[in-house]
Amino acid sequence: MSLYQKIVNREEKISLVGLGYVGMPIAVAFAKKAEVIGFDLNAEKIKAYQDGSDPTKEVGDAAVAASTVQFTSDPARLQEARFHIVAVPTPINLDKTPDLNPVESASHILGKNLKKGSIVVYESTVYPGVTEDVCVPILEQESGLKCGVDFKIGYSPERINPGDKVHRLENIKKIVSGMDEEALDEIANVYELVIEAGVHRASSIKVAEAAKVVENSQRDINIAFINELAMAFDRMGIDTNEVIDAMNTKWNALGFRPGLVGGHCIGVDPYYFIYEAEKLGYHSRLISSGRQINDDMPAFVGDRVIKQLVLSGKPVRSSKVVFFGATFKENCPDVRNSKVIEIVRHLEGFGIKPVLVDPEADPKEVRRAYSYELSDEKDAYEADCIVLAVAHDVYKKRTLKEWDAFFKAGSAQEKVIIDVKAILDPREVSAAGYGYWRL
């Protein structure tokens, strides 16, 4: 009997190693079809899941509370499973090189608890070759088992889009790969238990690894093109969003908008490609340039804050600047690689001490990741400048009059609005006389 059939019959279990924005939704989905062990080293996170709380907001408290996932921080529980999915983050170091510590650590833990007849599937974003050349030796070393003889491996890149309630795990086609045809069949069959959109069988693990970094690099380049236009049009006195609105009337326009590129995927994955390509003697030109443009955007926005303060007659150092939004995207608590924080740091270089508020972000995560304190919205009043940094739904619903309430008393000309996400109607804001700039 195949491992897939044993999983369907609930004779064997699936384990999820890493229960963040990717791993937790996968665990909950599989638990509807199989016995699932959800493992994470973060005991506080495990306790939250056990209590029926979903800090990621990806599936919701009710779904977590109703799930049969066996949440644990005890690595020995991994011995109970034979199909393992590794979904830990793969960030970058300060020098923009891949930080493989999380995936290597997960491999050490899993290797110590790996049993014969297992299949290990990595979902973490990596450059081509990491699964076979980095992870497999660790699994073999820790387990004493031989890959291809005692256990098999595969790779299936995560495609979950945090905060997206339309494109979900179940309706996004899943790329799957395996070290051989037998492993590929097993992996594909298991994922098809929960992926309603079906799977795409890649010809090799390296092809699947490459597909992940390429799909995000492609988006990064397209956004960089629009961001470069935004920086040029700003000097020309042309509204970039109006240009895009006009351009989008053509059937083949791509519809990208200028913005801050952060998060755990688009702002990180291209560096994995760049790193591996340069190791092999190829210097990426287009992808590297795109990354540089997008990395420069926080400073560009920060400089526009300073310029608007000066034009409004505000003393820069004593101005109260309030940021509405700290996450890397709208309607999501994820603050990883948030470019809003980089704008804040840029302004600090001019002596400004911005106030940072966000109803979606976890204050503990902001403190842990960046050593910043989120303020309550009651501390956002008496502002000289407000920065609409993230397009949370709660912000998009506010009227100009409601935003005006956050300013100090005075004429509109003395009030600065920086609209990073083009939330407001520029005609209404300009007609009212505010010092207004949007990306």
Image (spheres, rainbow, N blue to C red):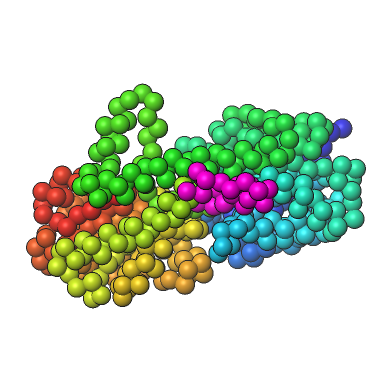
Where residue 82 appears, as percent x and y from the top left, is 81, 46
- Residue 144, image quadrant: bottom right
Residue located 67% across and 51% down the image: 279
- Residue 258, image quadrant: top left
Q: Is residue 402 visible?
A: no
Residue located 22% across and 44% down the image: 238
Q: Depth check: give the residue in front, 406 or 219.
A: 219
Residue located 64% across and 65% down the image: 43
Where residue 243 appears, as percent x and y from the top left, is 27, 37
- Residue 141, image quadrant: bottom right
Q: Is-magenta flag for residue 271?
A: yes
Q: Depth check: give the residue in front, 416 or 289.
A: 289
Q: 142 left or right of 413?
A: right
Examine the residues drawn in magenta and state their main secondary structure: helix
Residue located 63% across and 50% down the image: 278
Q: Is residue 365 visible?
A: yes
Q: 210 left or right of 153?
A: left
Q: Depth check: give the residue in front, 439 or 158.
A: 439
Q: Is-magenta flag for residue 179?
A: no
Count of numbered marks? 0
Q: What's the magenta region?
A: 267-289
For residue 122, above or below residue 375: above
Which quarter of the rendering shows the N terminus? Answer: top right
Where residue 214 appears, as percent x and y from the top left, is 57, 40
